[in-house]
Image (cartoon, rainbow, N blue to C red):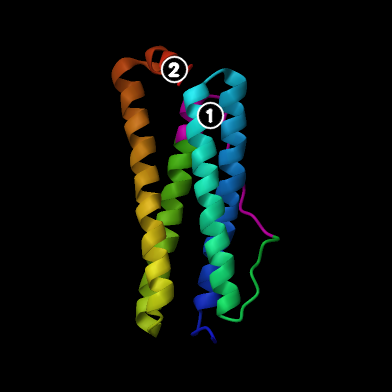
Amino acid sequence: MKAKEGVLDILNGVLKAELTAVHQYLLHAALCKSWGYERLHDHYSHLANEEVQHSGGLIDHILYLEGTPDVEHLDTVGHGQSVEAIFRADMEFEREDAELLRKGIAHCAKVGDFTTRHILEHMIIDTEEHIDWFETRLKAISQVGLEQFLSEQIKK
């Protein structure tokens, strides 16, 4: 099936963000593991796997639309030297991803590509859940303090 105007560019932009997220979350999982925060390591590993699934679905859909998936380029991988810093970097990354998805959804509606629109709408649900997760953790840190919060992250 041939893609409608601009849809492949949008899909490749979203794919770039999803592949970047895989790398970012793998890095953050490894950091949390090295810092001794088992619960955070597991959560970041789960996020990385979720982004791999999104990436695979996007690649399949781009190929279905007779396009070429761009798997060669990534955005800058956000990082930090503390749990709080990586939470902030990840929350900002997810907010930017949500904006990209919203623009893609609007464009797909405009050109009448409801299948791609549906895929992006499904992805934005996960993205908004991720934003909420980071916001909630940062709020917990502000309420109970960093040390108390981190003490709960050591074991599952």
Is label 2 in contact with label 1 (beta carbons under 8 Å)? Answer: no
The quarter holding residue 72 reads bottom right
Is residue 75 rendered to the left or right of residue 85? right
The quarter holding residue 80 reads top right
In front: 64, or 95?
A: 64
Q: Residues within 10 Å of mark 2 (few under 14, many from 20)?
A: some
Can the viewer see residue 48 in this picture? Answer: yes
> Which residue corresponds to the image point at 32% horizontal and 24% vertical from the top-left?
140
Q: Which residue matches tag 2?
A: 150
State the quadrant of the C terminus. top left
Please state the horizontal and vertical placement of residue 147, each as a whole percent of the image. Answer: 42, 12
State the quadrant of the N terminus. bottom right
Please state the horizontal and vertical placement of residue 5, each as a whole percent of the image. Answer: 50, 84
> Which residue corresponds to the image point at 50% horizontal and 40% vertical from the top-left?
46
Residue extending farthest right: 72
Q: Residues within 10 Å of mark 1 (few under 14, many from 20)?
A: many
Can the viewer see residue 78 in this picture? Answer: no
Residues shaded magenta:
73-87
- Say if the magenta span includes residue 86: yes
In this rendering, the answer to whether 1 lies above or below 86 is below
| Residue 41 circle label | 1
